[in-house]
Image: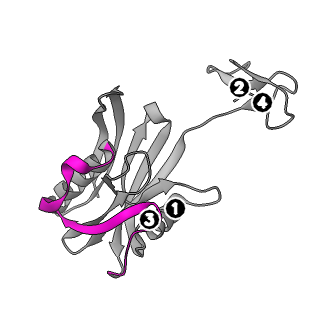
Amino acid sequence: MNFCSHCGARVRLRVPEGDNRERYVCTDCDTIHYQNPRIITGCLPEWEERVLLCRRAIEPREGFWTLPAGFMENGEAAHEGAVRETLEEAGARVELAGLFSLFNLPHADQVFMIFRGRLLDLDFGPGEESLEVALFAEQEIPWEELAFPMVGETLRLYFRDRAAGAFGVHAGTVVRLSKRPRRYRIELLSSGQS
């Protein structure tokens, strides 16, 4: 950030009085510009013993498989965003069953929320951000071709819970170990069954 969105003057990084973090502060009007994590919301769509995945048509991780998800919009609740993203990316209509996983991604300044959802029908297809959309049984999941570590962890937790006969709500943090090659560790904070 170079300029104040309030008055157009230059901004500089400094710790405002009463704060403990550096923020962009306007050098003219003293407006503090807070930058907070972005929320990604999505869905784990279920149909009988299978789950719906999308092959990404955009970067990052173009060509890799993921759950339908994307950034929340202003004025939208997280569950509304999950339904919207599922329709946009997979052309799929879902009825949500509740929050399933929440992962913090401090290295990307993001929070990733996934809701379980029941597909209402089999009328689905790739949206503009997907190359293809397909249903996968557990043994068919393309584990080595998943786009993001929290997608793989969400799927592992889902299949574990399904086998146990009870779904929980899971939370954790994705810790980046290195940029190249991409290496991550997932630290589960809680894993409870409802």
* Left or right placement of residue 7 versus residue 179 in this view: right
Give the mark toward the camera: 1 or 3: 3
Disc 2 marks which residue? Answer: 24
Whole-number angstrom distance, CA of label 3 to CA of label 4: 35 Å
Secondary structure category for the residue under label 4: loop
Closest to the observer, 184 or 179? 179
Give the mark toward the camera: 4 or 1: 4
Whole-number angstrom distance, CA of label 4 to CA of label 2: 9 Å
- Find out whether residue 2 is within the magenta segment: no
Secondary structure category for the residue under label 2: strand
Residues rendered magenta in the picture: 122-148
- Looking at the picture, how far across and down is residue 103, in whole percent? 38, 43
Closest to the observer, 77 or 6? 6
User: Considering only order in the chain, which callout, 2 or 4, is on the residue closer to the N terminus?
Assistant: 4
The relative height of residue 84 versus residue 119 in the rendered view (above or below) is above
User: Considering only order in the chain, which callout, 4 or 3, is on the residue closer to the N terminus?
Assistant: 4
Looking at the rendered structure, the kind of residue marked 4 is: Phe
Looking at the rendered structure, the kind of residue marked 2 is: Tyr
Can residue 39 be seen here? The reply is yes
Whole-number angstrom distance, CA of label 4 to CA of label 1: 31 Å
Disc 3 marks which residue? Answer: 89
Disc 4 marks which residue? Answer: 3
User: Considering only order in the chain, which callout, 1 or 4, is on the residue closer to the N terminus?
Assistant: 4
Can residue 106 be seen here? The reply is no
Disc 1 marks which residue? Answer: 81
